[in-house]
Image (cartoon, rainbow, N blue to C red):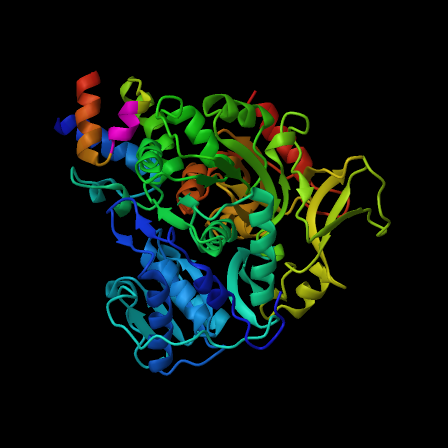
Amino acid sequence: MDDILAKVREVFHEAFGVEARMITIETTPNEVPGWDSVGHLDLASRLEGAFGVTFEVDDLMEMESVRDIVRLVNAKL
Amino acid sequence: MAGSSGYNFAGQLAGRLGEHSRLIDAATGETVSPSDLPRLISSFAARLLAAGLRGGDRILIGCILSPPSSIAYLGAMYAGLVPVPIEEGILISTLPELLKRTGARAVWTEKSAGVKELSGTGVLALDGHPGEKRGEPGPPAPCAESDLAVLVATSGSTGQPRFVMVSHGNLAANTEAIISSQKLGGDEQAMLILPVSYCFGASVLHTHLYQGGGVVFDRRFMFPDKVLHAIRKYECTTFAGVPTVYNILLRRSNLGSIVMPSLRRFLQAGGPLAPERVAEMQRAVPAAEFYVMYGQTEATARISCLDPRHLDEKLGSAGRPLDNLRVRIVDEEEREMPAGQTGEIRVSGPSITLGYLEEPEESCRVFQDGWLRTGDLGHLDADGYLWIDGRKGTFVKMRGVRVSFAEVEARVAAVPGVYECAAAAVAHPEAGEALALYVVPDKEAQDIVERVRRSLPTYWTCESIKAVAEIPKTARDKVCRASLAEKAAGSNG
């Protein structure tokens, strides 16, 4: 799980320009500038590329925190 | 329309609230009841006056999609103050600049943590739910129809934020024309995901309350299904969105399977939505009518509306001018163009605003003899329908928000290692348009693309950044944006 989190943090850095260390397992959208509806789609497609997974619409709806993202990615790997 | 000194748009609106006029925060379920709403507006107005503010004073209002910030906005106008609605995050990050530009005497945010360090500036910092600290409710402040009612932020061609001066009469005229064009009844409930600081969001708030209806606010559109479920739960009748919103609904939501029996209409404005997407929306939710509209902040909000009964026949058009507006098309020599021929769109009528705040020259250029020069290119067809053919090419419109190329280029040029840069707009499936940036590095800086990317605000959508040897220029040494856009389109296949 720690490996996944580290990679997720890198994707956040690429997508939103935030420093990777600012992203924790507890981080939620309102703490990250740019993590809005369009940012969410960008983040999802970058995550798909980084992990080689595909998200369904319902997966996107569940990504309400970094914790949710790590859980979803882990389930798909 | 009343023309007396007893004219106050928020006062008129408060007097028309009805049994359906509730404000709901969909995320928390917090509800302001129809019996409380008029009193909250007038008592917030009283609180502002009791704090020493006077008619005509400007007050920055930190907007989040919530009932309190809308009450604060309406309450300030009711008191005869001039609210300046600004998205809360932007307000907090650019406060000194906003205070300087608007001359605001006060700032209101929902939470006290929002605004700090105002002591010594003479600017009042107010916070809290408008219902918490009540003043004694009173009548609306008397205003003239031509008095300034609100300052609405929009992006300027120089890259500086600019403020459009909207009068009480402008708001009433546009509100009434929109209500008629959308056939709004007295029992409407809007789902609002657009901020009230944006003229389209404000127009939805105004029209629905003015008709005795209500508004549900939802700031969770990044999870579109939550908003769709809230439409169902709160029995919303209207949904408003910019092209980005509809692209997301079509591609990344369960629009087709979440049943919304109360929904009567979708409203779309804020840039062109591909006709195929409009048709897809109709197929996905056939029971709700789809209204395509065109507008500008400089014209209060809306200019034209395509009646859904003619949607199939006129798909791709922005509809007919609202019933109190005149539209004409002119060429560069100011000659009126016949039907079918493209020129600049000019608009006149009672919702054409007073001009830009403290920009007399630009106001004179854009607002001439009661006619607004929109800067948009279009044509009228033989039936009087307006078709938008493009813009004069000084803006990119990302997620429904105009950003000038000058602003983009100034920001990129400030990145160390950038010798020269140019921006073009390219089509983007979610954002509507996105930036394609071309950068000439002043030395072989390997990470120039990455550094430029990091310098961009997160609310801009950037499709590509390319390091190039030179920027294509016209004979008059202006950036040749058409060739840049072609280049971007070509390189993206």
Q: Is residue B312 above or below residue B123?
A: above
Residue A25: image location, x then y, percent:
16, 37
Q: Residue at x 63, y 33 (%)?
A: B485
Residue B430 seen in the current view = no
Q: Is residue B55 above or below residue B198?
A: below
Instruction: Tell me which corner region of the image, top left, top right, bottom left or bottom right, holds residue B290.
Output: top right
Residue B171 seen in the current view = yes
* Residue B131 part of the magenta-drawn span: no
**Nearer to the camera, B162 or B67:** B67
Across the whole image, how many numbered discs are drawn on residues?
A: 0
B349 sits left or right of B160 in the view: right
B473 sits left or right of B170 in the view: right
**Nearer to the camera, B390 or B409:** B390
Residue A76: image location, x then y, percent:
21, 17
B106 sits left or right of B298 in the view: left
The quarter of the rendered structure image containing the N terminus of chain B is bottom right
Q: Is residue B92 above or below residue B301?
A: below
Q: Which residues are magenta?
A: A58-63
